[in-house]
Image: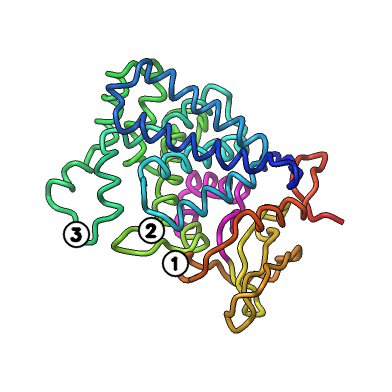
Amino acid sequence: MQSSDALDPNDGRYEELLARWADLEAGLSVLLSVPSHVHSFAAKIAQYDRWARELLAQDTDLALYLLFQLAATSSAGYSASHALICAVLCEVTANELQLPTAARSHLVRAAMTMNLSITQLQDELATQTGRLTPEQQAALHGHGIRSAALLHKHGVPSSQWLDIVARHHDAESGSHAAVANPAGSEALAQLLHLIDRYGAMISPRASRAGRDVGESLRMLTTGSDPMRERLGHALVNTIGMYPPGTFVRLVDGTTAVVLRRSRDPQMPIVAVLTDPAGQPLPQAKLHRDAGRIKSAVAAHTIGMRLNHRTLVQLGLFAVRPTRRGVATAAD
């Protein structure tokens, strides 16, 4: 797992991180919406990649908490929020797979820009309640190739970046080339395809609620394709079966929100939000032994507003850095 420097909740740094993630998302939204108006588009995307890496290095669990809450509870500005969460998931999974620096950069930048040709359409579809029109279906078909062409037009120099974008939507499973070269374009396109689908599954639309993360991961990681299984397990090992910012039900019937990962992908640190009858607690309670998780819970079923500042503080007090850089329950 990516390192997580346990910030001091009293020094205000985490509030600064909240603002910086919001600024990064807003800036990425502008880049994706009007790329023709952006000077040195490829260099700007590279800059946003570096900013995201710096923010992740400060506190990966906090970043995941914020991004999963955003992905699961809001459909506003879907295209940019989806691109950002996919880029972050690619970043942390690339570290788990120990990908070379160049391959990691191309993958993350492809995640940020994979849907460039349908940015406006993605935002429209997030709030659309009816079926796709024939025109919308036509626009979605082959959008990876059109996005790669747009990126080339706007000066993206990397052939691998462009290749990943072109392949990501229709990435084939079971390719011998992908198995033989995990840092090659085919394997990276498969990983982006997996993460793209995962992010889409957990995000709500006006026409449907987002699926719970456990169900989404199981749907994407089960099957007979060894490459997909390898990539799926790398994703689970990185973010956990129940990532920060997602909701779970414990075996006693209480509902909790995941605050931070632990060494065990199935045993995160959580804050209990309700009693067994489903009634909200006056104050969230830290639960360090979350091995008693029964299932994931879809965000739309929660029906309560969370005090994120309090929950983030609770999570920060619950952990300390370790030699391996993995957050563990404080003594």
Residue 245 lies in magenta, yes or no? yes
Amino acid identity at mark 2: Pro
The earlier-in-sequence mark between 3 and 1 is 3
Tag 1 residue: 300
Q: Please identify the quadrant where the N terminus is shown.
A: top right
Q: Position of residue 215 (x, y in %)?
A: 48, 63
Q: Residues within 10 Å of mark 3 (few under 14, many from 20)?
A: few
Amino acid identity at mark 1: His
Q: Residue at x 36, y 45 (%)?
A: 77
The earlier-in-sequence mark between 3 and 2 is 3
Q: Position of residue 304 (x, y in %)?
A: 52, 69
Q: Residue at x 18, y 54 (%)?
A: 132
Amino acid identity at mark 3: Arg
Nearest to viewer (mark 3 / mark 2): 2
Coloring scheme of the render? Answer: rainbow
What's the magenta region? 219-247
Q: Residue at x 32, y 37 (%)?
A: 115
Q: Position of residue 151 (x, y in %)?
A: 32, 23
Marks 3 and 2, how far apart in space? 15 Å
Q: Secondary structure at mark 1?
A: helix
Q: Secondary structure at mark 2?
A: loop
Q: Residues within 10 Å of mark 2 (few under 14, many from 20)?
A: many
- Name the one closer to the observer, 194 or 289: 289
Q: Verify CB contact (< 8 Å) between mark 3 and mark 1.
A: no
Tag 2 residue: 204
Marks 1 and 2, how far apart in space? 8 Å
Say which quarter of the image contains residue 306. bottom right
- Name the one closer to the observer, 316 or 204: 316
